[in-house]
Amino acid sequence: MFLKFISSRKFQTITDFIHIIICVLIVALSIFVFVSPLKHEYCYPIIFLGATILDFVSAIAKYGNSYKSHGHTLPVFIQVFFGVVLLVITFLSIVSIWRA
């Protein structure tokens, strides 16, 4: 049932809205960080977290599309791996800002 929803048109629309909202958020926060990096250092973890969410949502969408054609799950695992790497970077940036 869940795999049917992932490969549905409604899920793709939700995925597109998530991408648009998070990308606008990332661009806006990046402008703040570019203008004054030390004043807006709390934006770094939010930017990395947004990128992590985008990566995981894209991996889920890619999994829904590759579920019907067996053997194409390697790109999904690679994307999940990079999502985990971004999640680690997010936690490291939170810890470095917290300790400063």
Image: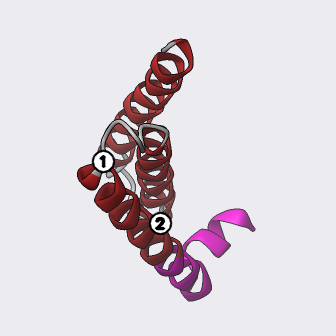
Residue 78 or 91: which is nearer the viewer?
91
Name the residue at 53% across, 85% down.
13
Q: Main secondary structure of the magenta part?
A: helix
**Does residue 5 appear to the left or right of 23 in the view shown?**
right
**Mark 2, residues whose alpha carbon is within 10 Å: few (<14), some, or many (≥20)?**
some
Name the residue at 39% across, 54% down.
70
x and y, in percent, of residue 94 in the image:
52, 26
Does residue 91 belong to the magenta stretch? no
Does residue 4 belong to the magenta stretch? yes
Q: Could you tell me the amino acid type at mark 1? A: Ser
Residue placed under numbered mark 2 in the picture: 22
**Mark 1, residues whose alpha carbon is within 10 Å: few (<14), some, or many (≥20)?**
few
Residue at disc 2, secondary structure: helix
x and y, in percent, of residue 23 in the image:
39, 68
Extent of the magenta region: 1-17
- Asked if the residues shown at circle 1 and circle 2 are in contact, with their CB atoms under 8 angstroms apart, the answer is no
Gap between marks 1 and 2, in whole Å? 21 Å
Residue placed under numbered mark 1 in the picture: 36
Residue 31 or 66: which is nearer the viewer?
31
